[in-house]
Image (cartoon, rainbow, N blue to C red):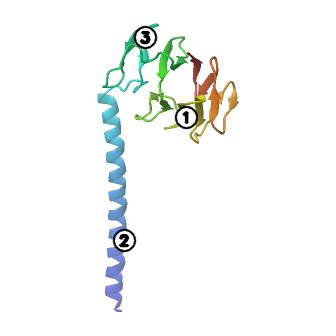
Amino acid sequence: MPVPLQDLLKYVVIVLVWLMFLRISRAIWVEVRSDTRRMSKTKTPEVSAVARIEGPTKLKQAVDQPILENSTKGAEVLELQRTDGTKERFSVNDEVTIGRAGGCSIRLDDSYVSSIHARIWRETGGLFIADLASTNGTLVNSKKITTKMTLHEGDLIEVGKHRFVVSS
């Protein structure tokens, strides 16, 4: 192969590699920028997609479908104890996911919480919790859980810097 043709092919390959690098960089930039814009335009609530219990019986809806006044009867409640001293209560009807991701039932804005950190669900035997391979783990009564575990009234669940107490 003639030398000028080899030189031309070298330059074409170099240009193609740079174009690919720039395309990947642009895609990352657009993704990061759109997330930042979306977050600044809409103030995402810290917790979403579950029923919030404002008082002993008054319910406020965090998603679009209505929740009946008696939907928490017989359901366990997770009480979130915030570091500023406030408390927030969440009913566990069938299944709840805890994490930073927008699709989680209980969304926590905490760098120590994984995107999808833990799952709490109801089976015939009671209420269960499982850590979903989170980076920092999930603690129940100050013990790190590795498999699914049964929850009882009064159990303390620690997810990142947040503490939940199970009550009925």
> Label 3 crowding class (10 Å Cα cut-off): few <14, some 14-19, many 20+?
few
Along the line of sight, the residue nearer the viewer: 128 or 85: 128
Q: Secondary structure at mark 2?
A: helix
Location of residue 85 in the rendering, given as x and y in whole percent from the top left corner: 54, 11
Q: Secondary structure at mark 1?
A: strand
Q: Which residue is mark 1?
A: 118
Residue at 61% over, 36% down: 136
Quarter occupied by residue 2: bottom left
Location of residue 110 in the rendering, given as x and y in whole percent from the top left corner: 51, 29
Q: Which residue is mark 2?
A: 14
Q: Which residue is mark 3?
A: 54
Residue at 31% over, 86% down: 5
**First in sequence: mark 1 vs mark 3:** 3
- From this view, report whether residue 15 is shown above or below residue 122: below
The residue type indicated by label 1 comes to: Ala
> Label 1 crowding class (10 Å Cα cut-off): few <14, some 14-19, many 20+?
many
Residue 154: which disc? none
The residue type indicated by label 3 comes to: Glu
- From this view, report whether residue 70 is shown above or below residue 104: above
- Residue ranking furthest to the right: 143
Give the alpha-carbon distance from disc 3 to disc 2, as whole Å.
62 Å
Residue at 68% over, 33% down: 144
The residue type indicated by label 2 comes to: Ile
Give the alpha-carbon distance from disc 2 to disc 1, as whole Å.
46 Å
- From this view, report whether residue 105 is shown above or below residue 77: below
- From this view, report whether residue 44 is shown above or below residue 101: above
Location of residue 143 in the rendering, given as x and y in whole percent from the top left corner: 70, 29
**First in sequence: mark 2 vs mark 1:** 2
Give the alpha-carbon distance from disc 1 to disc 3, as whole Å.
24 Å
